[in-house]
Image (spheres, rainbow, N blue to C red):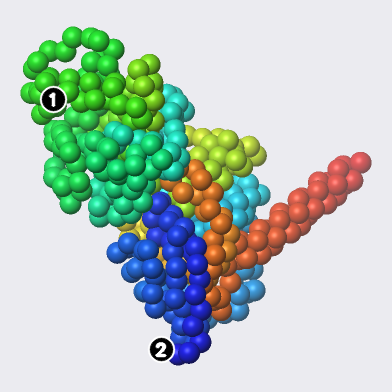
């Protein structure tokens, strides 16, 4: 280790939606490497430790190194010539960069979508139909005496969710931490999170909606057929006990994950859970919140909503935003072969999309912005290597509870930021659009003159 060491206090980990902002990073400035990440969980420590500045071109076209300016020109030409260009990803970059991506889609009358469409998209639909009784994670830490996790495994996906926010931390009205809380876990099987729970309910696969609806009925004082256990796998006695705990707690919270949103029922499941929280507010204070995965996927939802009125899957082809999941979401536009160009920002759809969608990505010009090499960057026609948000760049991200957090970078990167590349593409696209409109107007005037 060199003598040129820097300490960054109150840094933010952008690995997952917890966006913990109490990191203390030790940085070897000569090696450009983070050697220690105090307070980070196992995932955060790996996130910081594995980060290094790759010896890789800042921009490539068809695998060959080019200048950034040439790559920007090529990207702009692709987007302006496309009839149905799509923009996708955005969940692992700053809000400032997300804003530029939405603006590009607006200018070119394209399509903008985020990774929300393949994770908590159903929750977004449920919010619109049912509403949401919500909170901050700070409120949970200080007030919640009943914590319910439904369809998630935070012990592996969000380790500090337990220790910093919801289970073990001591709060203003929860002075003894976990001793003052009842923790319930609902899932189709036992997971590494199960030992944390005081109560574990093993619901039958695909029967979350039925269980939620039965709980709603019990909350409202309705009679339930004891045979409900045959359907859900949970006895009426257990349901009744849980409902009594929910109605008599001081502050209850329902956290739900993709085990609820991406299984049979989708947005109906999310809607039923949100409605259950609303019902419980007749008796006590109850809130609900999805547990989000990517570091700034919540920011992506917020930014796209600010700019368009909708959270994801937005189309500008008519000159104004339209929202229709299933029609304008990226998996669908690619699987049907509709998109003829793609701008992929901080995402790797080629590694996890359905086969039909990936096959179509290979057929169209793809532009990528990413800090690392992925399967998507490998197939890209234009590939930009960018700085890693939170480690090399400042900016704003949103925690899963919609709280904005400012990033404190550890050290600079030789690569441009996502925001810088997107601003340059936006500027060039706008120039090309104006030039195209000017040429069209000149041709129209010439046509009119020839007819006189």
Is 115 in front, or is 341? 115
Q: Of label 2 and label 1, which has the lower sequence position?
A: 2
Q: In this orientation, does residue 169 appear?
A: yes
Whether tag 2 and tag 1 are in contact, CB under 8 A, the answer is no
Which residue is farthest front? 175
Marks 2/1: CA–CA distance: 57 Å
Point out the image quarter for the N terminus: bottom left
Residue drawn at x 24%, y 36% is 182
* Position of residue 122 measured from the top left corner of the image (x, y, whole percent): 37, 35
Q: How many marks?
A: 2
Residue drawn at x 13%, y 42% is 189
Residue 33's mark?
none
* Position of residue 34 measured from the top left corner of the image (x, y, whole percent): 42, 76
* Position of residue 287 measured from the top left corner of the image (x, y, whole percent): 39, 30
Is 322 in front, or is 165? 165
Identify the residue under disc 2: 1
Q: Secondary structure at mark 1?
A: helix
Snapshot quadrant of residue 134: top left
Residue drawn at x 26%, y 43% is 178
* Position of residue 104 measured from the top left corner of the image (x, y, whole percent): 62, 53
Rendered view: 10 above or below 228: below
Q: Residues within 10 Å of mark 2 (few under 14, many from 20)?
A: few
Q: Secondary structure at mark 2?
A: loop
Identify the residue under disc 1: 238
Point out the image quarter for the C terminus: top right
Rendered view: 263 above or below 82: above
């Amino acid at each position: 280790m060199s003598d040129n060491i820097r300490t960054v206090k109150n840094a933010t980990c952008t690995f997952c939606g917890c966006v913990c902002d109490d990191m203390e990073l030790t940085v070897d400035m000569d090696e450009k490497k983070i050697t220690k990440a105090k307070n980070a969980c196992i995932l955060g420590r790996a996130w910081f430790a594995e980060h290094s500045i790759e010896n890789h071109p800042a921009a490539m076209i068809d695998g060959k190194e080019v200048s950034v300016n040439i790559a920007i020109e090529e990207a702009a030409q692709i987007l302006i010539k496309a009839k149905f260009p799509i923009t996708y990803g955005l969940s692992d970059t700053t809000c400032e960069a997300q804003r530029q991506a939405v603006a590009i889609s607006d200018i070119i009358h394209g399509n903008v979508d985020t990774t929300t469409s393949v994770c908590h998209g159903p929750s977004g639909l449920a919010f619109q139909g049912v509403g949401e009784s919500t909170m901050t994670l700070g409120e949970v830490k200080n007030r919640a005496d009943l914590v319910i996790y439904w369809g998630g495994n935070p012990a592996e996906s969000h380790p500090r969710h337990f220790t910093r926010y919801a289970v073990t931390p001591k709060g203003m009205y929860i002075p003894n931490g976990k001793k003052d809380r009842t923790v319930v876990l609902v899932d189709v099987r036992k997971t590494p999170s199960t030992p944390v729970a005081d109560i574990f309910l093993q619901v039958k696969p695909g029967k979350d909606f039925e269980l939620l609806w039965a709980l709603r009925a019990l909350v409202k004082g309705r009679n339930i057929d004891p045979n409900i256990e045959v359907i859900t796998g949970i006895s009426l006695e257990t349901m009744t006990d849980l409902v009594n705990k929910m109605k008599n707690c001081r502050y209850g919270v329902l956290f739900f994950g993709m085990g609820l949103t991406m299984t049979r029922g989708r947005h109906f499941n999310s809607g039923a859970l949100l409605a259950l929280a609303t019902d419980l507010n007749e008796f006590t204070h109850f809130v609900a919140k999805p547990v989000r995965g990517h570091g700034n996927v919540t920011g992506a939802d917020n930014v796209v909503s600010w700019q368009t009125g909708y959270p994801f899957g937005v189309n500008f082809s008519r000159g104004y935003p339209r929202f229709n999941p299933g029609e304008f979401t990226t998996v669908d536009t690619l699987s049907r072969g509709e998109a003829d160009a793609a701008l992929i920002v901080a995402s790797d759809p080629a590694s996890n999309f359905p086969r039909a969608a990936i096959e179509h990505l290979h057929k169209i010009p793809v532009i990528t912005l990413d800090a690392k090499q992925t399967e998507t960057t490998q197939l890209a026609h234009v590939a930009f290597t960018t700085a890693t948000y939170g480690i090399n760049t400042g900016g704003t991200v949103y925690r899963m509870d919609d709280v904005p957090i400012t990033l404190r970078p550890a050290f600079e990167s030789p690569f441009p930021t996502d925001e810088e590349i997107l601003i340059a593409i936006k500027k060039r696209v706008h120039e090309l659009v104006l030039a195209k409109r000017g040429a069209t107007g000149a041709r129209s005037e010439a046509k009119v003159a020839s007819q006189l």
